Image (cartoon, rainbow, N blue to C red):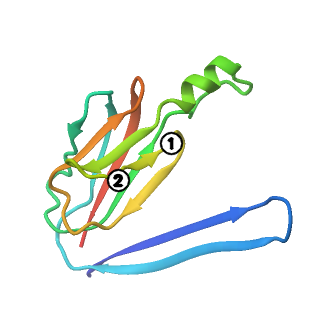
Amino acid sequence: MKSMMTVVSVVNFAGHGPACPPVESRYEVPVQSEEQPYLRYFTVEEEAKFLDTGWVEDHSLLVVRNEEGKGLPTNPTDEERAALEERVVELYGGESVFRILIHPKRSVQLTLSCTKGLMMRCRKGSARITLAVFPA
């Protein structure tokens, strides 16, 4: 039996003015590879490091989640909130002009033509990360 990857994403917005309907993305991708997904938990610091995407040679999806902010007290102090907001993770390719920002408690899903040369760093302090690389 071939493997199958299912991706579901929903963005809701509630605010002033007319309601904005949810933006949904749902799709399935048949996985041709026999490779297993690469899943790692690690901490990034202010010094940029190359992103290790493991054994997956041909990937279909890269998911990076900033775990900071999980497990905070129910009512964090203003200082705790301010310190958390500074733990933004940057993901970029070498000397690239653009940077993908991953704020605390948020994640990004990417399909890239190549993952070689991807760099990652935390803007201030350190941040716990979950990385998942799914084969094509």
Q: Nearer the viewer, residue 72 or 85?
A: 85
**Location of residue 70 in the rendering, given as x and y in whole percent from the top left corner:** 56, 34
**Location of residue 58 in the rendering, given as x and y in whole percent from the top left corner:** 17, 68
Residue at label 1? 103
* Residue under the point 30% across and 52% down: 97
Image marks 1 and 2: residues in contact by CB distance under 8 Å: no
Q: Which of 87 and 52 is in front in this view?
A: 87
Q: Looking at the image, is mark 1 or mark 2 earlier in the sequence?
A: 2
**Location of residue 29 in the rendering, given as x and y in whole percent from the top left corner:** 35, 79
Against 61, is 3 above or below? below
Kind of residue sitting beneath label 2: Phe
In the picture as drawn, the residue positioned furthest to the right comes out as 17
Q: How far apart are marks 1 and 2 (CA)?
A: 16 Å
Residue at label 2? 98
Mark closer to the observer (1, 2): 2
Q: Which of 15 and 40 is in front in this view?
A: 15
